[in-house]
Image (tube, helix red, strand yellow):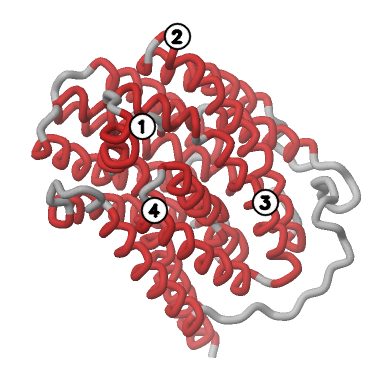
């Protein structure tokens, strides 16, 4: 009897992980589009109409985009709703929100409308309900590894973007729209899988307000407060990792063949980093994994900036993306592990608020610095300062939950 229960539990866990992988694949494809085809939509929406260079168009679009990222600040509300509506309802709502964003990006010929659509995609991407499932249902000793597997699936999905780009992009005006159409089809498929196969949550009640400050029982969790400061600092470095990568590669190597090879190799390297980071987080400690990821991010960004060889560029691109988001996800995982079960959604929501504020500050600063000191120097400054603050916060954080 005990063996049967164990086998049933393992089967249910395997099904859950499989569904989360499918969710992650769809989520990653949609979120990667903006970064991986940036030079294409810049050409049709800004460069040709306004007669601008790729570098000027890149700096301009990221400066203009800053107010639109305010839409993504709504994501904490979605995460907080998990404690009230349940995970599955919020997840389905999150998936359906992708579709109008993808549709706007696919059909518009105005870059302002395109940015609105991309903001809706960013909002949907940033909710990450799948990580609440990990914290709620996966054994503590395996959570970081499962998170690494999901991140690896995301990287594999990201590897499909340059492959699809090579097939779908013909050089005609606005042909990047096909890739957003594929995103709509993928999202609809994922929503159907979630609706049919993911179990509904048991009814739960809570009288706490979504805006109530983070707590652990009746005492303020000092370890949790340190983690909020850390996720704020690390969030400020997001722009240093994500902004200007594809345009920098395009300006450096110019030919589509080399660019597509870099964009294909990068996620494969990211897969290795994600899995290694997850295993390290479970086998050694969350703290050591975070510090190692931060160090790898800084070193790989510097090598990415200075490299003239496309293989080194692709490898360092993969390392910096994998290590940066592995660190961020493990910090988020520790925040959820430091939270009582009935407050996971809300504390995850508060973590997103701090992370988003840091991200917004980073976006403003990198847009200003890119115009004054250049793209490469701006990326370095915006990452290195948050990296120092993050490692310091992780090292001095109380080890025990208060």
| 230 lies left or right of 62 | right
Q: Secondary structure at mark 4?
A: loop
Q: Secondary structure at mark 1?
A: helix
Q: In the image, which is nearer the foreground, mark 4 or mark 3?
A: 4
Check disc 4 and report the residue beneath it.
Answer: 108
Question: What's the residue at 36%, 32% (across, down)?
Answer: 320
Sequence-earlier tag: 1 or 4: 4
| 335 lies left or right of 380 | right
How far apart are the alpha carbons under marks 1 and 3? 26 Å
Q: Looking at the picture, tell me which residue is in the foreground, 91 or 335.
A: 91
Check disc 1 and report the residue beneath it.
Answer: 320
Whole-percent x and y of residue 110? 40, 45
Q: In the image, which is nearer the foreground, mark 1 or mark 2?
A: 2
Splitting the image into 4 quarters, where does residue 313 fall? top left
Split into 4 quadrants, where in the image is the N terminus? Answer: bottom right
Splitting the image into 4 quarters, where does residue 274 fall? top left
How far apart are the alpha carbons under marks 4 and 3? 28 Å
Sequence-earlier tag: 2 or 3: 3
Sequence-earlier tag: 4 or 3: 3
Q: Secondary structure at mark 2?
A: helix
Q: Secondary structure at mark 3?
A: helix
How far apart are the alpha carbons under marks 4 and 2? 32 Å
Estimate how packed mark 1 is, as few (under 14), some (14 to 19) or many (20 or more) residues with alpha carbons within 10 Å: many
Q: Is residue 14 visible?
A: yes
Above or below, comparing residue 165 to residue 227 in the picture:
below
Q: Looking at the picture, tell me which residue is in the foreground, 265 or 178.
A: 178
Q: Is residue 282 visible?
A: no
Check disc 2 and report the residue beneath it.
Answer: 372
Check disc 3 and report the residue beneath it.
Answer: 76
Q: In the image, which is nearer the foreground, mark 1 or mark 4?
A: 4
């Amino acid at each position: 009897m005990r063996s049967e229960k164990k086998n049933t539990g393992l089967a249910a866990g395997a099904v859950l992980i499989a569904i989360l992988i499918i969710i992650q694949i769809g989520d990653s494809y949609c979120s990667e589009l903006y970064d991986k085809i940036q030079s294409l939509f810049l050409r049709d929406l800004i460069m040709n109409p306004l007669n601008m260079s790729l570098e000027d168009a890149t700096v301009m679009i990221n400066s203009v985009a800053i107010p639109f990222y305010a839409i993504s600040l709504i994501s904490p509300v979605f995460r907080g709703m998990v404690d009230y509506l349940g995970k599955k309802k919020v997840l389905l709502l999150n998936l359906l929100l992708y579709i109008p964003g993808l549709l706007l990006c696919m059909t518009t010929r105005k870059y302002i409308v395109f940015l609105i659509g991309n903001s809706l995609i960013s909002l949907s991407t940033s909710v990450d309900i799948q990580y609440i499932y990990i914290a709620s249902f996966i054994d503590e000793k395996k959570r970081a590894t499962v998170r690494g597997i999901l991140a690896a699936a995301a990287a594999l999905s990201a590897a499909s973007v340059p492959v699809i780009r090579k097939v779908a992009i013909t050089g005609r005006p606005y042909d990047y729209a096909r890739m957003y159409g594929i995103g709509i089809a993928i999202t609809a498929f994922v929503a159907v899988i979630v609706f049919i196969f993911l179990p509904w949550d048991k009814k739960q009640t809570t009288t706490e307000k979504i805006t109530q400050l983070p707590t652990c029982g009746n005492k303020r969790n000092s370890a949790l407060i340190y983690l909020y400061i850390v996720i704020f600092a690390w969030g400020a470095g997001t722009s240093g990792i994500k902004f200007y990568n594809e345009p920098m590669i395009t300006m450096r190597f110019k030919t589509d063949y080399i660019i597509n090879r870099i964009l294909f190799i990068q996620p494969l390297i990211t897969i290795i980093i994600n899995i290694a980071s997850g295993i390290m987080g479970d086998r050694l400690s969350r703290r050591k994994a975070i510090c190692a990821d931060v160090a790898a991010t800084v070193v790989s960004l510097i090598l990415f900036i200075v490299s003239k060889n496309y293989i080194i560029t692709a490898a360092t691109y993969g390392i910096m993306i994998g290590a940066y988001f592995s660190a961020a996800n493990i910090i988020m995982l520790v925040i959820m592990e430091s939270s009582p079960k009935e407050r996971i959604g809300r504390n995850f929501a508060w973590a997103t608020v701090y992370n988003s504020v840091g991200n917004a500050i980073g976006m403003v600063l990198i847009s200003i610095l890119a115009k004054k000191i250049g793209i490469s120097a701006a990326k370095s400054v915006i990452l290195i300062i948050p990296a120092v603050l993050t490692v310091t916060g992780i090292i001095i954080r109380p080890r025990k939950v208060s």
